[in-house]
Amino acid sequence: MRSGQSGVSALIILMMLLGQAGFSHAASPQKTSKTKKWLELLRIDKGVEREIDKNKERVLIGLPADLKKEFQKYSAIIFDKQKIMSDLFVPFFSKQVTEADLDRWISFYSSDVGKSIIAKQADIKKRQNEIIKNTMESIKKGTAVKLPSVNLNDPKYAKSLRLFKVLDYKKIYGQMLRVISRVLPPFMLTRFKKVFTEHYYLSSMAISTEEVYTNKELDAAIDFFSSTAYKNFIKKLPEIIKNQQIKYRQYIQSRIEKLQKDDKLPQDLASYLLRKKG
């Protein structure tokens, strides 16, 4: 299960997440306020902080020695998280969702049951990683893999399986295999796939889900992740991320240009950064 992105890991997983119709081109103050609340609930600011730290590190590594100290002194001005959130992320994401969908997201993430579901995602993620790790270790050692004995037709697992279907578990399963294929040699990957089948994955996760979530939480999770508010956003998420990354680079460049024009950055540092970005 994921968050805005994110999670949402949450993001998520999110978080570290578009309505298809009714997009607003000029957000009202009310919608802007709701968008800000939504991004806070998804902890997007934490993702922005991580991205800023990576940006600073990349820039610092490539800077000439005589500009390193200047950059360290002014980097907080260039990469002002609050300005980036208010000037870029809030207006950008406000155009990606309808106000009705914002209300649905905020209602879920603000509710007690929603908070509990999101908080428990860390446990689910940990268990999923342990399943993969134990499977890989067994294959590397040549020992037998203990397969879960689960009858997926048992009504006991009906809600968990319904949740997996809502979350498009086939897509998640495929993504996991693609990630694993990058770290395992071909012969081991073949052996891994023979064990880590779709049934094996579903069975293992069904057990974990039943142990972690209550029936009330499963009902609420199924309801939200089945909603158009969630589905509309997830459907266009790759496009949203791509556009957001482009706008982020454009925003930082325009910010450096403005700081240079206002004499808030040393001219040599600003000129070098703009030259590199160009």
Image: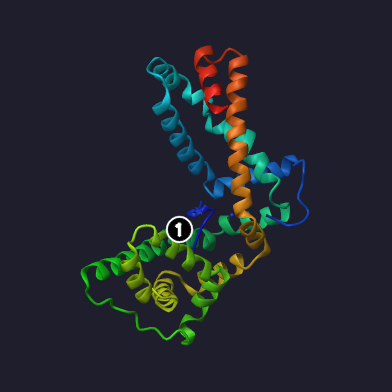
Question: What residue is drawn where x is 53% and y is 29%?
Answer: 80
Q: How many marks are shown on the rendered structure?
A: 1
Of the pair 130 and 210, the residue shown nearer to us: 130
Of the pair 8 and 175, the residue shown nearer to us: 175
Q: Is residue 191 above or below residue 109?
A: below
Question: What residue is drawn where x is 72% and y is 52%?
Answer: 99
Which image quarter: residue 201? bottom left
Q: Position of residue 118 (x, y in %)?
A: 49, 59
Q: Position of residue 215 (x, y in %)?
A: 50, 75
Task: Name the secondary structure under disc 1.
Answer: helix
Does residue 81 appear anywhere in the picture? Answer: yes
Q: Is residue 216 left or right of residue 250?
A: left
Q: Position of residue 127 (x, y in %)?
A: 36, 65
Question: What residue is drawn where x is 63% and y is 51%?
Answer: 239
Q: Is residue 43 above or below residue 55?
A: below
Question: What residue is drawn where x is 54% and y is 61%?
Answer: 114
Of the pair 171 and 188, the residue shown nearer to us: 188
In which quadrant is the C terminus drawn?
A: top right
Q: Is residue 140 left or right of residue 241?
A: left
Does residue 7 appear anywhere in the picture? Answer: no
The residue that disc 1 covers is: 119
- Counting other residues with Cα less than 10 Å from the Cα at mark 1, is it few (<14), some (14-19), or many (20 or more)? some
Which colour scheme appears in the figure? rainbow
Q: Position of residue 162 (x, y in %)?
A: 54, 76
Q: Is residue 109 left or right of residue 214?
A: right
- Furthest toward the front, the residue is 186
Amino acid type for the residue under numbered disc 1: Ala
Which image quarter: residue 146? bottom left
